[in-house]
Each structure stands twice: as structure tokens, then as C-alpha cells.
Image (cartoon, coloured by chain):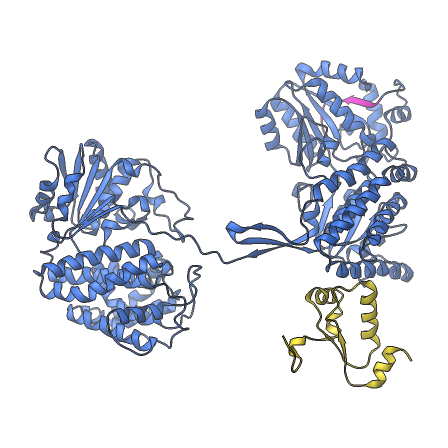
Amino acid sequence: MNTIEELNCAGGESVLDFSSVDRIDAAAARALEELADRSSVPITLRGVNIGVYRALKLLKLAERFSFASYENRPGAQK
Amino acid sequence: MTENLSNLSDDRIAYLEGLVRQGRTAAAIFSQFTQQDVDRIVKAVVLAGLEQAQYLACLAIEETRLGLLEDKVLKNMVATEFVYDYVRDKRSVGVIREFPGRGLVEVADPIGLIFSVTPITNPTATVLFKCIMAIKTRNAVVFAPHPKAWRCCEAAMRIMYEAAVKHGAPEGVFTCVEEPTIPDNVYLMHHKDVRLIDATGGPGAVKAAYGSGKPALGVGPGNTPVYLEKTAQLDMAVVDIITSKTFDNGTICASEQTLVIDDEIYDTVLQKFADLGAHICNEKETAVLGRTVIDSETGAMQPMAVGQKAVDIARACGLRVKPDTKLLIAPIQGVGRDYPLSVEKLFPVLAVYRTRSVDEALRVCVDVNHAGGRGHTAVIFSRDDEIIRKFSDVIDAGRIIVNSPGSIGALGGVYNDMVPTFSFGCGTGGGNSTTDNVNLYHYLNIKRVARRTPAHMWFRVPNQIYFNLHAVENLRQFPSRSTVIVTNPHLEQMGLVDIVRRAIPAQTPVRVLSIPDAEPEKKVVLEGAEALNLHKADQIIGLGGGSVIDAAKIMKLKYLSPDVDLEELAAPFLDIRKRVVRYPAGTANRVRLIAISTTSGTGSEVTPFAVMIDKERGRKVTLADYSLSPDVAIVDPQFVMSMPRKLTADTGIDCLTHALEAGVSILASPYTDSNAMQAIRLAFQYLPIAFEHPENEEARSMMHNAACIAALAFANASVGVNHALAHAFGARFGVSHGRANALMLPHVLAYNASVPSKFMPSPNQRAYVADKKYAMVADLLGLGGDTVAGKVQNLVRATEELLDRLEIPRSIADLGISEEEFGRAVPDLVQIAFADPSWLSNPRMPLTSELSDLFWSAWRGRSPVKAAAEPVTAMEGVHA
């Protein structure tokens, strides 16, 4: 069973932490596209920097994910 | 995917879609890169391209069979080294340029995926060039080379791609269509993910690019005329032309096509060409050549000749030439279809034309230029700057190369300081969107970040103002060889002119120019200017109310600048600093204008405004310019002690209106606010006393000062909608200016204090503050109130009480103007008021419906149109 199937079986919502991602490359873009294609649970990308967000937007992937920032997490420290 | 307009197979579409997908992904990934990343990759690709310059030239020759190996190597080197030299220090990521003084910043954004068509004539060099541009600007490119040059182009792209990816560029940043076809191009040109088409090639490719509806850089054919003018350095010119026209066997579209030579040097020049290896064709040879290398049906070049050596072309035509012949020169007698060699020839055949004059030479050059070369390139050899200028004026070319080779000159960076390129923008003449040498800036979306810049403000007033009783005595300090006093008969009879005369040094010749006691007519002003000229006046004293002083201002203007067109100077303007018409500069100081006001209202003694009546045209001419401001103002209350009560009230309210309007004007500043506030305080305190006790010297003096101080404010902050209404109403019903202002004033205060239905654009204001400034006035006057709205109400009430005390009618109706009569007038009044420039500085932009409401409110009488609303915001943004 691969990771995406595990995610699907687990149900609920998946949150991916992007806070340490400065930049994505073509492989990452493909992986995200595959994730969006195959995942049956909603996926939230948290802490995505604006450069990466714009790249996802240009790739038309942004609309396939939810985005959350760390500031919105209950109890998060700024 | 895009619509299959080209009937491509599914496999081919899938292949093209794959290229686009790679490019789109690469472009998105690339958008995250920094300037440092980009510059590192650019250097790497340039070095890779440079290293393979010879290899790529070999591939190009092998595949295309066009041009010369040595020159193709040079082209590849120029396309890498010279282009790098241009781009290396240029910013292309984020902020690329800043203009701190203008509050402007330019921010670069990549375009995305570019579809690029490249030509057969300069295949590898063009690919190298475009790869560098794309990396520098973080774009991805799908290349579609000429079908007969795709292998060498693919190799060039691959070399650049591998170097780029090795140094961090995203995968798929460059791709190349293998075995490209026109249907492939059509498909890709229409693809929704292609953001820009950069088509360098033949007219078909360029036309298709522009026809796609996509943003496109289409760079097509040329037909370069060269004018060899008799003052030119002939040896240099001949070598340059041979160098250029034989460069890569003439394949650069900027190379010389028809050489136009002055008669005086024609034979010498041809001999020099012959001496250096050119073959000069005779008439018969020219005819054969024309028939062979140009398609007689289409007028297009025969492919067999393109990029071939002169000797090979000569052999193909059956011409006998020396084996080392570099260039075939064919004399022609005209331009057009009857002269096949007058078109573009991308091979070493040069047409020559003998001309008898500069005019004829220019005509022929224009003809050549228009025979397929508009917008591209032209060349002139001359040492006569005037002829170079004329040539530049009449030739339609993005590049006009002077005293240097056309082809290499147009590439830029070698013979001149133009931007290095392999893509020549041909402007609208060539059906292109630019005349530039296409460069990195054409591969960027450049965003302008424009910060709010407060307009420079000003506070301009006469440099000398003398006030208080007997201030007129200061006239003694002004030497004059000839003084003219402009006044009116009434003031003369009252003895006021004598008072002035006594204050003028005894030795000064003084003449009195008495004009009618009314707004000055143009005729009167022009006669006055003539009188000033007759007396060679060096000092003008305007003694009177606003009309007399205005007349004196215009007389001085016309006297010093007799040729000015007063009508033109009265042209409307929105911002005095950006106005269309300019007043004469530097003359105003030659004659001193001293203004002595005999009323306490207009403040004309310190303002830059003047009004006159043009009876012939039946209109008022309002002039406004700081050069009209008097040099000296004398504010001496002895001249107003005998003002009648009604005049005291009307002019006093005019003064108050000036101050209240300047106070809330969008041009108000702390400088004008201080004057406006002080004038308001003085008017509220002393106007009733001056009205009720005309003999009260202090009240007269203070009101006289108030009028001048209010004028200092409105001379710089202007007035507002109250004046626009009053001008229209007063003129229509013959009501004095001050009284007309008074009838509008309470209604306008309430109007400006409420939330505008339309705000005025006002870069100098940080918030809507009219209501708060009125509240400040109320505080200054001690009127009480706990809120802004309450204070405004108190100010409106205090103003109404003041008007009552001055016995000013409570309404327009009270003047005896019936509702019907007024109703008939209102549409016109609204139109006239809206055309009045006074409201342009009003804090609220008046809608015409609101102007109508205000007129009707004034007709009904003193109860404000609308109670002052709640404060718009807190007190922030208030100057004073």
C-alpha cells in the first residue's frame, strides 16, 4: 500500500507542512499533482511561502489544495 | 490542450502537449528563482554556447547549406559574448529599476512559456540568443526552428539546456519541436498555455504569430536602402558595405540591398568596389541576374541564391566573373516590380542607383524602404549631419545605421551602442509591435509600483505687503521715472488719488488713468496698455477695488508682452503647474505693480487672478497666473473708511467666503490654513462692528487686513463651489459678488460638511477633513459643541446670524425672484456653475443634481440643505 492509499484509507483530512520548503522543483510539482489526482481526502498545505504558492498557482495546482498558515493554528506563537 | 486547427495526428498533438506541459511546469518552477540563481545560470549557458560556437556553426552550414562558416562562428560568439556583456549587470528579477524622486519602482515578472520561431538564415545564433534572454528573465521556451534548420537549432538548444539544468535551471526550461511543420506552429501559437510568441523568420511566420491573437514579437523581412552621400569617407564606406553585404553571404536581413550613390562620386565608388573584389554587372548581366535570382512572378528571392557565394550565384546565372569575386553589383534605374533586384536579396548581390541630387537620393531610399523594408533597417554614409537628419526623418526603420555596416551594425554592440540582438523589431511599418532590437525587457512583464507622491505645494505672495493706517506712505521708498495710477473717476473725486500722489516722491512724473467703475472691459485694458507704453511707465499703481486692480494687472501683462493672446491665456486648467498655456516669463519684474485696495473683500492686491469682460464675444475672461500678482500691496484702512454699509457687508462676506473655502480646499496647506483661520476670526469679530460702526477705525483696519489675509490663503488654496454658484447666480440676476456669495454660504457649509456622494481626487489630502476643519473654525470662534457635527451646526448657525446682522436677505426669494423665474434659470445656472473652475478645489465634487439642490436651497433661504452628518472619520489628516 503506498502513502497516498494509506492517506485515503485513514480518512479525515491530511495536512502537509510546507513551512521549511523554500522552493519546489518539477519533481515536487509532479508529486503534488499526483497527490491531488489520487487523494480522496482533503489536503491542506500549511505554511506555504508565497513564492511556492505562486508557482502552484501558475501550475493550476493551488485550487486543488487548501492552505493554512501557522498563525491560524490554535495556540500558535507568532 | 488547444483546438486542433491544423489536423494534426493524435500522436503529434500528444507530443506537442508534452512539450508545452514541460515548459509550463518549468516556467512555474522558474518563477521562484532569485537574481543570483538566474545570473549564475546565464553565465553557465553563455560559456557553454561560446565554447560550442564553431561546432554549432559547422552544424548550421552542414544542414542549411547557407552562409559562411567563419561568419556563422562570429554570429554565435556575438549571440553569446556580446549579449552576455549587455545582460550581465541588468536586473531582471524583482525590483529592476527605482526612481526614488518619483516614487516609482519597476518590478519584473517572467512571462511564462514562450513559443519561439527561429529562422534558417541565422539558426544557431538566434537560438543561443533567445536561450540567454529566457534564462535571464526566468521564462521557458518551446523552439520551433525552420524545418530546414531544426537539427542544428535543436543541438544549440540542447547545449544551452544541459548547461542550464546542470546549474539549477528547471527541467523542461527549453524544448525543441523535432521535424517541425507549419501545422505544429499553428497548434502551438494557439495553445492556451503559450504566453508569448517570439517569431523571427519569414513573413509567413510573423503573420501567423500576429494572427494567433497572442501577444507576439514578430520580426520579419527587410529591404535596407543605403545612401552613400558625396561627403562620406568613401574608402571606409566601400569596405563597410562589402563587409556587411558579404557577411554570412548576406543572410542577415539588415544587410544592404540597394546602394544609392551621389552622381559626383558614383564612378569612383564603383571603381573602389571593383578594386576590392566586386564585380560590376553590365546592363545585360544585370538583367540575367535579376531573372535568375528573383522569382518574376512573386518578386521573391529564389532559394537557390539565398546565402550563397557571389561566384556561385554568378556561375548559376552564366556570368563570367573573377574567381575571388566577393560581391555582384547590379546598377538599376528604378525601384519596384520592373526592377527585380530592388527587393530584399539575402545573398551577396547589391543593387546600385545613381542619383543627381540629395532629394532624388532620399526619394529612391524611401522607395526601397517601402518595397518590403518598412520598419527594418536603413544605412547612410555621410559627414553631413543635416542630410543624416533628413534621412532619419523620412526613412521608416527601427535602426538607422550611420557610417557603419548595416548587418553587423544592426546587431548592436559591435559598431555602435545599440542593444545586441538577433531579432529586429520593425514597428508598425513592418506589422510589429516594437521598433526595438528585441532584448530581455521584451521577455518581461514590467510592473510599475507607484507610490503616492504628495504634489509639491507652494505659497506664493507679493514680496511686500504694507498694512495699517497710513501704510500708503511707504510709496516714498519706490523710485520711479514714470508712474501711472490706474483708478476710477469716483475715487478720484473722493480725493483718494491725491492721497496717493502725496505719498509718491515729488520728482516722480505721475499720470492718472481713470477707467470706468465696473469690471474692466477688454477694450479698456488694451487702451490702458497703450497708455502705459506711451508714458514708458516703470511703475503702475492700481488704486481701487478688485475691478481696478484686475485691470491694472492685465494692462501690465499686455504692456510688457504685447503679443500675448489674452483669450488663449484664459484657457481652463486643472492644475496651474501643468496648464497648457504658459504666461510670458521673465518680464514681470521690469515694471513694478503696486496695488492699493479701496474695498475690504476681493483681496485682489495680493492674488494672481484678474477678470475682464470681452464685450465683443459676450464673455468673461478670467486670467490666473502668479506673474499677475502685484509686486507690492498696500493695505491702508484710510482708503476704506468711507465704504458704504452695504458694500462693507457684501465685501466683508466675500472675504469670509474666501477664507472658509480656502480652509477646506483640497489645495489647503498649513500655510494657507493659518491665514484662512486668522481671516475667519477677524471677519467674525470685526465685520459686524465695521458694518454697524463704519467710523470704527480698528474694525475697518482689521477687516481690511482680514480681506488681504484671506486672499493670501485663497491665492494659493483657491476657492470652492460657493464661488462657482455665486458667479453663475450673480451674473444672471445682477447681484453683487459678495451678496451672491452670502446667499449660498450657509448651504455650502452644510453641504461640504456632509459625506460626499463623490470625493475629489486630492493627493495632498490624507482623509476627508472638511467637516473637521469647520469644527476647528467653530472651536476657534468659541462656538461650542461636543461633536464635529455639533460644531459644524454651530458654525452654520453663527454664519446665519452674522448674515442677519449684516442685513443680508435670507433667501434668493427675498430678492424678489419668483419661483417660476428662478426655476427657468436653474438649468442654465447649473451648467454655468459646473463649468466654473472655482469648484475644482472644493473638497466635494459637486454633482449637477447637487448644484441644483444648492441653488434651490439658497432660493428657499437659510436652512441648510442637509444637517451636518456624523464625522467622516476621526480628526486625523487635518493640517492645522
In the image, B345 versus A30, the foreground residue is A30
Q: What percent of the width, then of the height, locates residue B687?
A: 16, 64
Q: Determine whether B144 is above or below B699 in the image.
A: above
A69 to the left or right of B735 = right
B103 to the left or right of B596: right
Q: Percent position (x, y) of residue B821? A: 25, 68
Q: Is residue B335 part of the magenta span, yes or no?
A: yes
Decide: is B639 above or below B787.
above
Is residue B192 visible in the rendered image? The answer is no
Magenta span: B326-337
Question: What is the letter of the yellow chain?
Answer: A
Indicate the colour of chain B. blue
User: Does the magenta-highlighted stretch encompass residue B761?
Assistant: no
Q: Give the quarter of the image for residue B149.
A: top right
**Left or right: B89, with B186 as reference point:** left
Nearer-the-camera pick, B500 or B244: B500
| Number of marks present in the image shown | 0
Residue drawn at the location 31% of the way across and 60% of the way down: B673
Name the quadrant of the N terminus of chain B: bottom right
Counting from the top left corner in percent of width and height, residue B424 is at 72, 40
Q: Is residue B668 left or right of residue A33?
A: left
Where's the C terminus of chain B, which quadrant? bottom left
Task: Inspect this view and state whether residue B845 appears.
Answer: yes
Q: Position of residue B779 (x, y in %)?
A: 28, 71
Q: Residue furthest front?
A: A77
